[in-house]
Image (cartoon, rainbow, N blue to C red):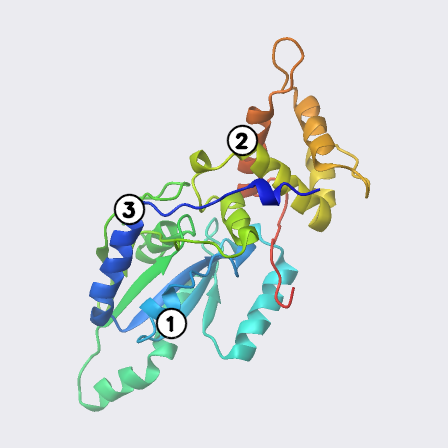
Amino acid sequence: MSDLQNINIQWFPGHMTKTRRYIEKTIGLVDIVAETVDARCILSSQNPDFDRLLASKPRLMIITKTDLADPDITSRWLNFFKGQGRACVCVALNTGKGVKDIIPAVRTVLDEKIRKYAAKGMKKTIRMMICGVPNSGKSTLINSLCGRRAAVVQDRPGVTRAGQWVSLSSDIELLDTPGILWNKFEDMRCGLHLAFTGAIKDDVVDIETLAIELIRTLKTKYPASLTSRYGIEIQPDSEPLDIYDGICKRRGFILRGGELDYERCAKILLDEFRGGQLGRISLEAPYA
């Protein structure tokens, strides 16, 4: 039986309200909005509030962390968005693959506006806002685009606290914004996926229960990832808690008196999933 019903994942601190107001205030200053989404949970990492906040502007979806996601599923997502007529670019943040495709994609989306300026003998300065859920790779992406350390980068949500303009080239300026969630997850699986990938701070959830749910998900979707990493044989009737116990024992996470150190195991499991040590994993697929 799933512990999903016992998990309450909600995280909407005050600075996110300020960010939402900031976006509303500055959206009129930009020509296009680039939204970063995590390739491992593309559906869950699309903030539904953006459809209202950004409705007046053209948008480019930047699918980040593709080197951590299942390539076959990422390809299916690209075909899905292509069918919808949505502009998107895939980026592997660890290697920088795909970063060079972003600016050309921006110019393609804004082609008509750029040509109108050119017809008047004017050069259009493109102003682009970048936004996304926390820990979706915005800061790393900006640094890659700039070729320098322009934004603070940490592998935890909530680092960027104020909007900041960054010059990408002579005719492109980018407005960075802090990561923002929405104030209520209608589907708790969405909250789980965001928590698995680190978009929600670990200290606002029960990480041991979160680890069990991650094991449950991996057992269903990628059982070989657990077997390969931890040497645990997975059977169809294997219970997530039994797998959890097995990982603790295999890693030697045992406290004095023989009690299993579930907290340490949970932290390691989540860190290794987020870092790609469990393999390239996608939590969501189109049409599923």
Left or right for 119, reference 155:
left
Choose top left, top right, bottom left or bottom right for residue 142.
bottom left
Neighbours of disc 2 within 10 Å: few (<14), some (14-19), many (20+):
some
Q: Is residue 234 above or below residue 133?
A: above
Q: Is residue 257 above or below residue 117?
A: above
| Disc 2: which residue | 267
Q: Position of residue 237 (x, y in %)?
A: 81, 41
- Real-space Cα separation, disc 2 to disc 1, in angstroms: 36 Å
Q: Quadrant of the N terminus?
A: top right
Q: Which mark is residue 14?
A: 3
Q: Which mark is residue 59?
A: 1
Looking at the image, tell me whether mark 2 or mark 1 is earlier in sequence order: 1
**Label 1: which secondary element:** strand
Choose top left, top right, bottom left or bottom right for residue 270.
top right
Q: Position of residue 39 (x, y in %)?
A: 53, 57
Q: Nearer the viewer, residue 149 or 34?
A: 34
Q: Quadrant of the C terminus?
A: bottom right
Q: Position of residue 197 (x, y in %)?
A: 51, 46
Residue at point 25%, 88% (across, down): 116
Q: Nearer the viewer, residue 62 or 100?
A: 62
Choose top left, top right, bottom left or bottom right for residue 121.
bottom left
Q: Is residue 54 above or below residue 278?
A: below
Q: Are marks 3 and 1 in contact (CB under 8 Å)?
A: no
Amino acid marked by disc 1: Arg
- Real-space Cα separation, disc 3 to disc 1, in angstroms: 26 Å
Q: Residue furthest bottom?
A: 119
Residue at point 30%, 76% (across, down): 56
- Real-space Cα separation, disc 3 to disc 2, in angstroms: 26 Å
